[in-house]
């Protein structure tokens, strides 16, 4: 480990001038020989699994403000309610829950025979205590938003609580995805315990050396998670670039990477990769203040002209999922039985012809006269120039649209201008992307006045269905409401969803076991990992 720490120190000096960018471009080359030599050295140095996080002076999971530290703390702490690989709430410390008829509160039952690492039972007192700590946590604490939406929590008995929320909302259950801490351990000693965490999961706290390392040790637990590897070392690194370099040199065993970083570490065949779906949606948006886009035939033609499969392979290198609705295909709420617009240039021409869009003057651009208004299908696609994926999609779409009689060009502008143009509704079409909240609610994009409804899309039927989605408090009614939403939005071609991006974790070849992750917990299966002998 001393050798590893020295290597990190040297890297900090080498990388001090490096900056990460939003463009996703990376011109670094792998040195395979150096990689293999370093990996061998790392294997000989330690049987511990080596991860990383940022520097911190706080290891309390409810008041911590850093997401990388939160990832590490999830190895020690179990959540009240978990979220599975299909983005669905599932049991964890909570065994079951039921909304009250009002919808703004629920009763929740805690599993019996759960224990903290010090042997004391997990009870309703711990849940009440955790919620109060979370509500009073710093503004930038990872789980602050969850606490803000919980109005109260009261103990019914040792294993049951009632939790109230600021409003009736189907998404309230997602606010219970937070780590529970021990009321007896932390109690009035929050400050003195902030660097000596005590949890309940597969690994427990062993030691912490500020600015250097957090060490975790395999621990008996009541969640049935029997860790294989005795200890995990989480070394402190200053930034993402250092993580990537450390992994490349065999110092870190596991990193997570988004689509722009994929391919850098898998070209030698010595890396293990496990992909997982994310909530990041890329889509095509229209400006409904322009009359041409209020014509459904035009929107349908654009949808038919978008070569999603080709874009998946050439732009995303197949590290994404094509979607026909605004909901992720991996989600428990996904509805496959919707109107689909598979790539079909002839169909695009057909719907335009049927809609009265023809090229009478022979200039290659379709036009239509409606109530003395002469309109031509001539518009621009707005993208931000730093985003290579969006630019590639825009140029490919523009090319396809010209082949069906729509003259489209691409406007690639700096991100600040892109945001300003969207906010001011100064565009024709745009390629957009959004990393969505874990709570399934599309009001921000589809609702009248939604925070990201740059298109000024407004539909009374959609607003009504969105209301049903927000006010469905059981699984069946929620699935039905979201099914209706997807069917209607797809039939209207309100937006054109393209893909949901995947992300991944990369593992050095010395790691064995179930290398798996979800977006809400990238180290979910860490207790199943072990070092190859």
Image (spheres, rainbow, N blue to C red):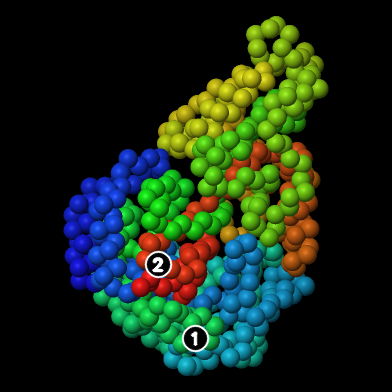
Tag 1 and tag 2, C-beta contact below 8 Å = no
Could you say which quadrant of the image residue 366 lies in? Answer: top right
Mark 2 sits on what residue? 511
The residue sitting at 55% across, 22% down in the picture is 409
Q: Position of residue 301 (x, y in %)?
A: 71, 28
The residue sitting at 38% across, 40% down in the picture is 25
Q: Which mark is residue 236?
A: none
Mark 1 sits on what residue? 221
Residue 350 in view, yes or no: yes
Q: Position of residue 198 (x, y in %)?
A: 41, 83
Q: Position of residue 136 (x, y in %)?
A: 47, 73
Indicate left or right for 6 with 229 as reference.
Answer: left
- Above or below for 215 versus 111: above
Quarter of the rendering occupied by the N terminus: bottom left
Residue 435 in view, yes or no: no
- Mark 1: few, some, or many residues within 10 Å (few <14, many ≥20)? many
**Relative to the observer, which residue lies in front, 167 or 495?**
495
Indicate left or right for 260 with 501 as reference.
Answer: left
- Above or below for 137 versus 15: below
Q: Spot the residue most to the front.
A: 533
Callout 2: SS: strand
Callout 1: SS: loop
The residue sitting at 52% across, 89% down in the picture is 115
**Relative to the observer, which residue lies in front, 44 or 455?**
44
Indicate left or right for 53 with 175 as reference.
Answer: left
Q: Spot the residue most to the top.
A: 361
**Mark closest to the chain's N terminus, 1 or 2:** 1
- Mark 2: few, some, or many residues within 10 Å (few <14, many ≥20)? some
Quarter of the rendering occupied by the C terminus: bottom left
- Kindly report the distance in space between the C-alpha atoms of the residues bearing marks 1 and 2: 23 Å
């Amino acid at each position: 480990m001393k050798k590893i720490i020295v290597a990190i120190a040297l890297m900090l000096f080498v990388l001090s001038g490096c900056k990460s960018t939003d463009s996703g471009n990376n011109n670094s080359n792998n040195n395979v020989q150096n990689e293999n030599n370093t990996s061998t050295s790392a294997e000989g140095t330690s049987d511990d699994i080596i991860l990383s996080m940022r520097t911190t002076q706080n290891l309390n999971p409810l008041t911590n403000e850093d997401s990388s530290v939160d990832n590490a703390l999830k190895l020690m702490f179990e959540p009240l309610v978990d979220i599975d690989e299909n983005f669905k709430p599932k049991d964890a410390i909570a065994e079951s829950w039921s909304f009250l008829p009002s919808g703004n509160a629920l009763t929740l039952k805690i599993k019996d025979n759960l224990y903290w690492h010090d042997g004391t039972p997990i009870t309703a007192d711990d849940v009440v205590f955790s919620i109060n700590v979370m509500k009073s946590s710093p503004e930038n604490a990872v789980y602050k938003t969850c606490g803000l939406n919980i109005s109260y929590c009261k103990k019914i008995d040792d294993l049951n609580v009632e939790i109230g929320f600021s409003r009736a909302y189907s998404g309230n259950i997602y606010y219970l995805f937070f780590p529970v801490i021990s009321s007896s351990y932390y109690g009035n000693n929050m400050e003195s315990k902030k660097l000596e965490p005590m949890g309940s999961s597969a690994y427990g706290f062993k030691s912490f050396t500020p600015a250097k390392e957090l060490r975790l040790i395999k621990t008996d637990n009541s969640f049935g998670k029997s860790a294989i590897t005795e200890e995990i070392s989480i070394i402190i690194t200053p930034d993402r670039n250092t993580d990537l370099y450390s992994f490349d040199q065999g110092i870190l065993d596991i990193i997570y990477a988004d689509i722009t970083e994929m391919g850098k570490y898998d070209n030698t065949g010595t890396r293990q990769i496990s992909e997982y779906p994310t909530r990041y949606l890329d889509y095509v948006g229209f400006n409904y203040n322009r009359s041409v886009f209020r014509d459904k035939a035009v929107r349908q033609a654009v949808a038919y002209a978008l070569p999603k499969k080709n874009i998946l392979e050439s732009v995303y290198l197949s590290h994404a999922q094509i979607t026909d609705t605004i909901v992720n295909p991996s989600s428990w709420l996904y509805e496959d039985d919707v109107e689909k617009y598979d790539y079909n240039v002839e169909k695009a021409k057909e719907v335009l012809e049927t809609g009265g869009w023809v090229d009478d003057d022979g200039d290659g651009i379709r036009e239509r006269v409606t109530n003395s208004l002469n309109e031509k299908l001539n518009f621009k696609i707005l993208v931000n120039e730093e985003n290579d994926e969006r630019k590639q999609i825009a140029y490919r779409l523009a090319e396809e649209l010209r082949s069906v009689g729509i003259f489209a060009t691409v406007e690639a502008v700096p991100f600040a201008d892109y945001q300003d143009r969207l906010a001011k509704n100064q565009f024709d079409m745009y390629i957009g992307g959004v990393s969505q909240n874990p709570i399934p609610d599309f009001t921000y994009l589809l609702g009248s006045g939604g925070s990201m409804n740059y298109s000024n899309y407004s539909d009374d039927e959609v607003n009504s269905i969105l209301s049903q989605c927000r006010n469905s408090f059981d699984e069946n009614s929620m699935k039905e409401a979201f099914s209706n939403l997807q069917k209607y939005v797809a039939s209207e071609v309100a937006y054109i969803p393209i893909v949901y991006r995947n992300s991944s974790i990369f593992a050095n070849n010395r790691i064995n076991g179930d290398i798996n992750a979800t977006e809400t917990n990238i180290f979910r299966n860490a207790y199943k990992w072990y070092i190859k002998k």
